[in-house]
Amino acid sequence: MIIRQEVDGIPALIAPTNGPMHAGLAFRVGFADEPLARRGITHLIEHLALYSFGVADYHYNGATGVEHTYFHMQGAEADIVAFLNGVCSGLRDLPMHRLPVEKEILRTEESSRGESPAERLALWRHGARDHGMPGYPEWGLHGLTPDDLRSWVARYFNRGNAVLWIAGPGVPAGLRLDLPDGTRQVVPAPSSTLPVRPAYFTGDSNVVAWDAVVKRGAAAAVFADVLKRMMFRSLRQEGGLSYNVLTDYTPRADGRAVIMAVADALPEKQDAVLGGFVDVLAAARLGMIDESEVTAVVNQRRDEMRHADAAGGRLPGQAFNLLDGRPLQSLEEALAELDAVTRGDVAAIAADACADGLLMTPGDNEADWAGFAEAPSESENLVDGIVYRSIGDSAPRLTAGEKGLSMTRMNSAVTVLFDECAAVLAWPDGGRIFIGNDAVQVRVEPALYPDGHAVVVALDARVRPELRVTMPPRDPERIPRPPASTTDTGSGSALSRVFRRIRGR
Amino acid sequence: MLPAMPPRQPVLDPAAAYPRINALRTALDSGDWPECRSVLDAAEPVERTELTMIAFGETGLETFLRGVLTGDPGDGAAGALLGQHLIGAAWRIRTAARSEQVSRERLAAFTEGLEVAERLLVDAAARSPHDPAIWTARLITARGLRLGRSEARRRYDRLAAIDPHHLPGQWQFLQQLCPKSGGVWALAHTFAGETAAAAPPGSFDPVLVAEAHLEHWLEEHGRSAAAGRRYLSAGPVRDELNEAADRSVRHPAFRRTHGWVRVTSTFAMAFALLDDRPAAAALFTALGDLGSDRPWDYLGDPGPTIVKYRKRAGGGGT
């Protein structure tokens, strides 16, 4: 039974627990809210707010997600009070002297962490904005100032945009959530860069991944588990093609949910893992789903839900519901929804999911043969403007116009329009990468064009200043230069580095 | 003196040896699906798969078979037949020429046609995962669409789990392992040898040993008769061919079920080419009036070619 209360003007959800007391403070802000040029700001604030706790022997953490950010603590009542009060005062008065060090810590954290399939899928599905943000590095870290952080906190980490949950006997004495006033911030609507679905793009050689957006609910969650069982049987037990298979169900604020599936693949088995995965999806799409499998998953989820509820583990999800303006769901309601799921419901979700699917194939495998359309990696249109040829034909042709810029080589073109620009990475040597909202990138290396630096100045002037990300100086060795003489076309590496039609990092 | 009668040509139409082919053709032509099913359902697994493969060469079946599938999407026999039919249509666009001699437009249309077939077969396999005819067809699409050796292996493993002695599928997978499809000879010979060794006495499977050597002979030595003879008559190859024939076509348990003509004819060609005339003659005699296009078409027009080698072997009359 969840009790609703209010603590210092913040809605609170309170439920008993059969384990240690824990509590959390959640905010309706996440990666999806960050403009690309500010990417990383929420995570940085989360780190700064927790700085004062140092290496204290507490079970606490903070987590920045796509749509929500929360601070969580498990322990004695007094410790929880100290933690939540401390988070609020940390947010009110961020330890700005820590800014350079925390930025460095985050950069290290990022570089030690590989890019996950989920992030790649997010980028290709949504582009360089809102729900595509997890696919991008925390580029905003370079230029974020104390004022940037303060205005972000004022907008998102405020009383009106927070929900508290407590798994324990009640609101502990001494809890003082001193946050500024503010208003609830709605989750941005997810963008799409996929004109046709199901679609595919080529990814890493060692993994097949897929995601789909479906109606949120128990049937979709059950399907995610059923899919994992199908993959495990087909790819691991029968075929011995994959070692790890996993699926994931992530509800979204807009009433939809993302189902994701990943299977690893040895390089010599990648074709077979793709083929086997295509067959698993086909079976799901056509409703070849066992009644007994659905029953087994429902039973397992029912047990998990009961256990979670007893420990207060359903509270974070309910806090997010409250932040998203969605109804709260009692355990009884959730169990009833789960028990009502039929094999037919799961099959219907499976069919919807397959129709919406985005597949990341291993290596350079195509998937047209399996009915997936190639996701666009180029631009359809070129801008009107002045055409610049590179010195010694060392780089693609650059067209710079009043509306945007294009790079063309052979039959391929990439275009970024100034009105549709998500960010410009700017190096002190003049190198630029313009990134469009559709995640298409145009890279300009001024050294490779006559008057290249003047062109860059003109381009810079046409992009809103807040989109600019100032990058640290590059190693001079890595700055592309024109070939030494006209006989040396030197196109190879410089060309391939300059002309990147593939989106991504 | 009267001029000599021209030598009798072998009958190459498989329907001469296997009457169910004509029964199925008639049922297909008259759009009689219950009759098609009764012919297919009465067949043994290998025979059934071979029967579905006649749709490869027939034209004008698509509307009929799609209609059957609309009525019952789970009908695996209709799925396999339509798959083979679509594969055949795609292959006729491509022609049998080596890929570097086929125009880019033709190759694109071929790929597109095979993709249509493959998508149909993906669904058919999902609905009927234990149908060997569907997996056999998917071995052909895997090769034509260049889906990779490990994917072909996966499909073959699915087939072998249903029927480990399914020659039509084994033959397709052997093609995949040959260098012309991106494989290497060692893989092809190993697969043929292991499959032959695992087969029960008197079965068809050991013919894969002869198939692999004939592929190898054609690719590496086919341009020179003497070099070809040297390859096939070299000790180890000759021994392997004899051992395979002993386990298969020359074994008392060898049965004249669907496929026996092609198996016998393939061994006959191998022995004829390595110039073991008695061995070839015995097989030509066993074949009587019957013969097979494959693999004789590697040497040219199969009918006259068989006549020529049969005469040289001195068996099976003239």
Image: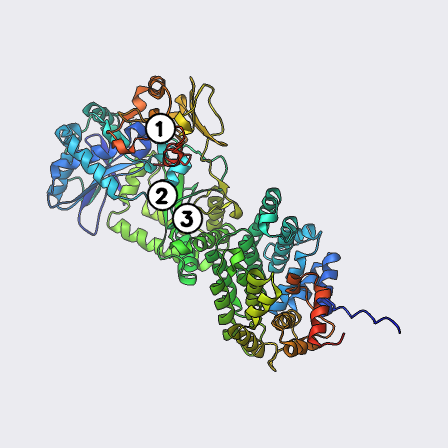
Whether discs 3 and 2 lie on one chain: the answer is: yes
On residue A118, which mark appears?
2
Q: Earlier in the sequence, mark 3 or mark 2?
A: 2
For residue A381, side relative to residue B58 (left or right): left
User: Residue B90: where, in percent of width, then height?
Assistant: 63, 50
Chain bearing tag 3 is A
Label 3 crowd bin: few (<14), some (14–19), many (20+), radius 10 Å: many
Classify residue A231 by image quadrant: bottom left
Residue lying furthest bottom in this view?
Answer: B252
Question: Toward the viewer: A94 or B289?
Answer: B289
Chain bearing tag 2 is A
The residue under label 1 is A482
Q: Secondary structure at mark 3?
A: loop
**Kind of residue indicated by mark 3:** Pro
Q: Earlier in the sequence, mark 3 or mark 1?
A: 3
Classify residue B17 by image quadrant: bottom right
For residue A250, side relative to residue B303 (left or right): left
3 or 1: mark nearer the eye: 1
3 or 2: mark nearer the eye: 3
